[in-house]
Amino acid sequence: MPGELEIISRIRERARKSVDVRIGIGDDAAVIETGGDMDLLACSDLMVEGIHFRTEWSEPRLLGRKSLAVTLSDVAAMGGAPRFAMVSIAITARLAPNFVDELIEGIFGMADEAGVSVIGGDTSSSRDSLFIDTSVIGQCGKGEAVTRSGALAGDRIYVTGTLGASALGLRLLERGLRPGKPGADGVKDRLRLRAMLRHLAPEPRLSFGRAMGEGRLATAMIDISDGLSTDLWHVLEESRVGAVIQGQAIPVDECAAALAEQAGEAALTLALNGGEEYELLFTARAENDDRIVEVANSLGVKVSAIGEITGEEGLRLELGGRIEPLPARGFQHII
Amino acid sequence: MPGELEIISRIRERARKSVDVRIGIGDDAAVIETGGDMDLLACSDLMVEGIHFRTEWSEPRLLGRKSLAVTLSDVAAMGGAPRFAMVSIAITARLAPNFVDELIEGIFGMADEAGVSVIGGDTSSSRDSLFIDTSVIGQCGKGEAVTRSGALAGDRIYVTGTLGASALGLRLLERGLRPGKPGADGVKDRLRLRAMLRHLAPEPRLSFGRAMGEGRLATAMIDISDGLSTDLWHVLEESRVGAVIQGQAIPVDECAAALAEQAGEAALTLALNGGEEYELLFTARAENDDRIVEVANSLGVKVSAIGEITGEEGLRLELGGRIEPLPARGFQHII
């Protein structure tokens, strides 16, 4: 069976774009020109039981919420506003009677929060696994979409929020911890709960992403779904540039800082390689730094400058006075 | 576990429409006003292994083709033109190495034929079942979308093509027949092959559906995915009208006529209740009959007038001088 990246690469090679498809397969969302003053954005995300989640990890409401949140995040990563969603669900016979109701409630709750109308979808039964595929249609001003390919040498690299918590939360869930089961130690319980909820209920950066698009403040943008190192590699490859990032500038989440070692990982490794963060990673001209900080402050979003785009290709990490190559997902091999 | 209709009804109740959603959940596709002179159409269709298909029934190319064809058919049923598609696929480890390539080739082949650009989607592995969800974005002139709710008393009821072959093909496939395995009897082989291919490779009525929308010729339209009786019931319920259809006017496919009895069914039962036909069922003012016949002839599409919309609610079948109620999917109980 071919791997996911191989399949995507074959699909991408095979796809032909009509003239009104400005960006096709290969970015967070496709960009379609409408002829009017708005461009359309479109994207899908698939969540499969046993691959992306287990039903016993959380209440179904959070699962429904996340299934739409991850797709909304793709629209945010293009600098656009999500508007419409379609949801296809295949459910198994072993689910509890109220499971589907709560799952749907979670999807609609997320849609309401984001100002998105659920306009369609499909339902089916499934023999074995629960499947949820969400498609989102969004919009942005004509030519405003922020792609992965616009990073320029000299741009600063930024990331929203803090990193490492979602990957830590996943490890805790895999070890049998659950959000509803507090233990004996108050502080650690709070941090563990925080980590698990960062994994189970990610908050897409909708307002911030939209502000970057509207203000034309970012040269390239992507959401962190595969991990900072991998997603930065995507930007570098599409933009044909390189980067140096500063290890000490990476905003490691407090729970990763406190609990990573117990989970058998360095906190920085989790922050660099942990996936499913749904924070935004973007690049911008240095002269826009003040405006970016202003937008971040006005929206209450933490933003960290973590490095710089270079003309020389490749991704390097500066840490403790040393600079070393940083492969996608490969940080664990060099620390 | 709630049934599919119950889930859809809950989703439909829960959905709130923003002002630019002219038609939301509950028709073949959603209709979105763009503010310009075109409306957008959007819909999804989900196919799950073991529920909608078995991988051993056909070459993967046909499966890929059908997974997109059924969603394109929904856009045709709104009188629109499909433009863009997104495809989410979850694949299992047991599939042959070239299976995914051929599946993708089938999807792109259908997209090319329909003039549709594949602009995105998602891929995943799956533990047990192959899962294909396709979403299509189409367009039609502002206000031209043909819904299920516009049928008026006195309208004629029409159907494209012939009916009953797909359901017969499904029964043959379930009994172990395959398109690639010819038997001894030439005529029956041709008819059996025809039936199986009508199930495995349905041809969406894209040009005809579009012509009905552009010409504003149909008052209501739906594609036959659940079976003529059930899909006509959908139109009657949404339009708050009734209908009388003539049994002898139903265009029974030649293979259903020849082979239905061997399959333990009456040919007319298959034609009235057999699903997955992807023919168009529509209603039109009687004065448009000439223009409809003209469009059908110019596109080489067979169209049959099968009955009339009545002010009195309910669906009745006239057959052999008797008129009897025709429940959705219920014809087998009264023949």
Image: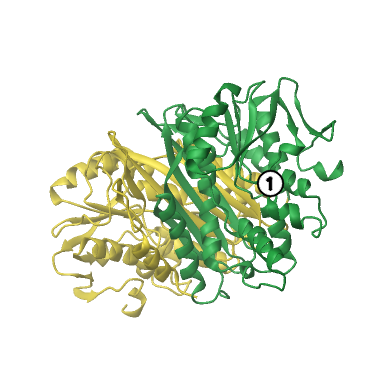
Chain colours: A green, B yellow
Quadrant location, the C terminus of chain B: bottom left
Q: In terms of depth relative to the viewer, which is nearer, B170 or B320?
A: B170
The percent position of residue B121, horizontal first and vertical second, equals: 55, 45
Which residue bears the numbered disc 1?
Answer: A4
Residue at 26% x, 67% y: name it: B247
Dot 1: element: helix
B160 relative to A99, above or below:
above
Q: Is residue A242 left or right of residue B283?
A: right
Q: Quadrant of residue B14?
A: bottom left
Residue A316 falls in image quadrant: top right
Q: Which residue is more in the foreground, A77 or B172?
A: A77
Residue A254 image offset from top left, x and y in percent = 69, 52
Tell whether A328 sits left or right of B314. Answer: right
Determine whether A217 is above or below B245 in the image: above
Q: Callout 1: few (<14), some (14-19), or many (20+) C-alpha neighbours within 10 Å?
A: some
- Classify A135 as above or below B139: below
Residue with the most extreme bottom position: B333
Residue beneath the point at 21% across and 51% down: B219
**Residue B191 in sight:** no
Q: Amino acid at mark 1?
A: Glu
Question: Mark 1 belongs to which subunit?
Answer: A
Q: How many marks?
A: 1
